[in-house]
Image (tube, rainbow, N blue to C red):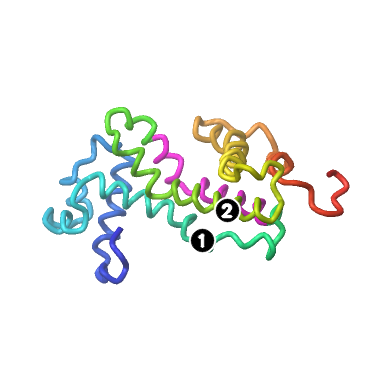
Amino acid sequence: MTSPKADRRGTAARIRTAARALFLERGYGATSMDAVAAAAPVSKRTLYQYYPGKAELFGAVIAEVWGRFTDAPPLPDPSAAAPRVVLTAYVERLRAHWDQPEVIPFLRLIIAEAPRFPELAPAYVQAGKQQVTESLGAYFEALARAGHLRRPGNPGLAAAQFLGMVKETLFWPRVFGGGASFAVTDVVEAALDMILLPEEGDPTG
């Protein structure tokens, strides 16, 4: 994505805004670079100066959508804040990310069109999902070192399982047009109980 310093006139931002609207309205395959240039509006030469191809432009749009979540500060060291508090707040940030109007529509677009355009899934992963996985994985490694995980031998797996438990019940039903069947608090507490050792003095442990 073009840096703010290199985009003083807002040209790249205007291109991404136009592209985001067209991708969501028409889909990836039916959106041409000519259409993006006309909607921006910029010349085709200017468009290609910023984004050499549609895949790069799509990746920049996805990175912008993800950015409101991935630009947050790193998760704190376990010695600085209680893991249950940190991870509960993390899920709330995830839910706020999912509430953005573009997030679920873009995922639906990728699911629908990835068989024809294999570049879409890597763009989605590289633009945001990979950063989320790596960041949470690093935090779970710190949890393992601090003795907070029930199964400390594979903190990366624990991080993936935690996300999986949360997303299976709170996110994927929304992707498919339904509603969550369980209360958010119940889902988060159950996931934490399965992943974390009880804190000192916790009567439920």
Q: Residue furthest top?
A: 115
Judging by the rendered image, the residue that carries numbered circle 2 is 93
Closer to the camera in the image, 93 or 150: 150
- Residue at 32% across / 31% down in the picture? 113
Check disc 1 and report its element: helix, strand or loop. Answer: loop
- Residue at 74% across / 42% down in the picture? 193
Measured along the vertical axis of the image, is residue 142 above or below residue 162? below
| Location of residue 42 in the rendering, given as x and y in whole percent from the top left corner | 17, 57
Q: Magenta segment, which residues?
A: 86-108
Q: Residues within 10 Å of mark 2 (few under 14, many from 20)?
A: some
Q: Are marks 1 and 2 in contact (CB under 8 Å)?
A: yes
Judging by the rendered image, the residue that carries numbered circle 1 is 72
- Numbered disc in front, either 1 or 2: 1
**Quarter-wise, where is residue 9 in the image?**
bottom left
Q: Amino acid at mark 2?
A: Arg
Main secondary structure of the magenta stretch: helix
Q: Amino acid at mark 1?
A: Ala
- Residue at 26% across / 69% down in the picture? 6
Closer to the camera in the image, 90 or 196: 196
| Location of residue 70 in the rendering, given as x and y in whole percent from the top left corner | 47, 56
Between the residue at mark 1 and the residue at mark 2, the CA separation in whole angstroms equals 9 Å
